[in-house]
Image (cartoon, rainbow, N blue to C red):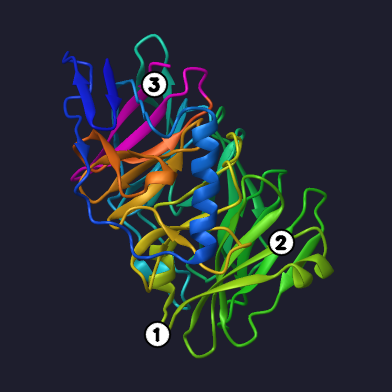
Amino acid sequence: MIHIRYGIPTLLCTAVLLCSCVVDDNKPKAPPMSEQSLKRLQEISENEMQRGGTLSLRFQARLNMVGHLPYDTSTLPLVSPNGKFIATSVGLPPDTSTVLAEPGSPSPLSTGVEIWRLDPSKDMFEQSFSLEPPLLLGRSADAEGFLVESPSPEGPRRIGKVSWQTGELTWLVADGRVNAFATLGPEGQLAWSSRPVDQSGFTLVVRNPKGRELEIAPNGGDWFFPTWSTRNNRLYAFWLTPNAGMKVVSMLTISSKAMNDSMKQLHLGENGSPAILHRAVAAQPVIQGLPPSPSEELLFWHPEEKYLVAWNPKEPTPYVLLTDAMSATHDVSGRYIISTSRDLRYVDPSRMHQSVRLHNEVAIPFRTSDGSGRFLVLTPEQDRVAVRALTPAS
């Protein structure tokens, strides 16, 4: 068991327990934050004080290996909300132009998808289904399944959803256009980018649970990587402007009027590109079916600041999580488990300059709805992904 307080680490070592656990109070502090962000963190701190959690941060957990999965070295696997399934991209990695759905990009004829299922008797993942090429693993999942995309050699690109349980593939968008970057909403919504095969300029398309669709024109630019909130029908999307400026836009999606009236935007810098925006979301998949985040926020890598940030559209600026953070998720208390370029850390948002090391390797954390509250953490290796279960003791 690992028992950690800020400044007081205790470690009892066994083969299945975390092997490295230290408190690092010498990490570089985040850049100065806006007055609004400081106010928000002060509110978080006061809430923590009320429940006695800020002055004594504790984390007790077990870490054990649950499998090694193949992957194509370029696409992050997707984990089901309950933590019992993992979808991984296999075969040759797709061309970057294919990932970004650029005109004339090649079809991924050697890229497929596998589904791995947790065997509870062994607490290990074993392969259950294999889906043939050409198929790109998407960036969103829910309790029923996960999204995939199939670019054809002729140019059109379809969006489908695959069942975790059966491996059955159902096409959701197949209209002869290039359809890409799809994401699932908390109530069964779907959002994606769409353009004609022979034209540039991605339109943003939103489909509600009853099948009604709303569209936002590119206005000379492109819409990329829509991302649903896990709390409500708020949608985020990245817009590359006609002069290569980068913005992230937040909007409500109940109607066209609501989308226009509720729009808030955050400027992300100049000299943008689809590849730069892809970097912003590559390590933050959209998983529905988990408890929502404590407050409304979008986690993404800021292309100009070059930090992982959290943005609440009620605030004019985002705040930095850790200066070398790669991806993050919440635990049940609202604190963050953060993957950095070197390790895995536990962070209290009211004390962002302090953190507790949970694992001494790069590990992308996925929260699950498992009754034990465990996380799955994925460490990419040369041609496979090591999957470990991080299970809090309480």
Q: Can residue 352 be seen in this snapshot?
A: yes
Instruction: Give the labeled residue for mark 1.
Output: 271
Q: Secondary structure at mark 1?
A: loop
Q: Can residue 156 be seen in this snapshot?
A: no
Name the amino acid type tagged 2: Val
Instruction: Give the labeled residue for mark 3.
Output: 392
State the count of labels: 3
Mark 2 or 3: in front is 3
Left or right? Give the position of 20 relative to 74: left
Distance from the alpha carbon under mark 2 to that under mark 3: 38 Å
Left or right? Give the position of 32 relative to 222: left
Whichever of labels 2 and 1 marks the residue nearer the N terminus, that label is 2
Instruction: Give the labeled residue for mark 2.
Output: 206
Name the quadrant containing residue 146: top right
Main secondary structure type of the part rendered in magenta: strand
Q: Secondary structure at mark 2?
A: strand
Whichever of labels 3 and 1 marks the residue nearer the N terminus, that label is 1
Residue drawn at (35%, 25%) of the image: 59
Distance from the alpha carbon under mark 2 to that under mark 1: 27 Å
Name the amino acid type tagged 3: Pro
**Any magenta on residue 390?**
yes
* Residue 40, above or below 124: below
Task: Write the start and end of the magenta stretch as one range.
Answer: 370-394
Distance from the alpha carbon under mark 3 to that under mark 1: 43 Å
Whichever of labels 2 and 3 marks the residue nearer the N terminus, that label is 2
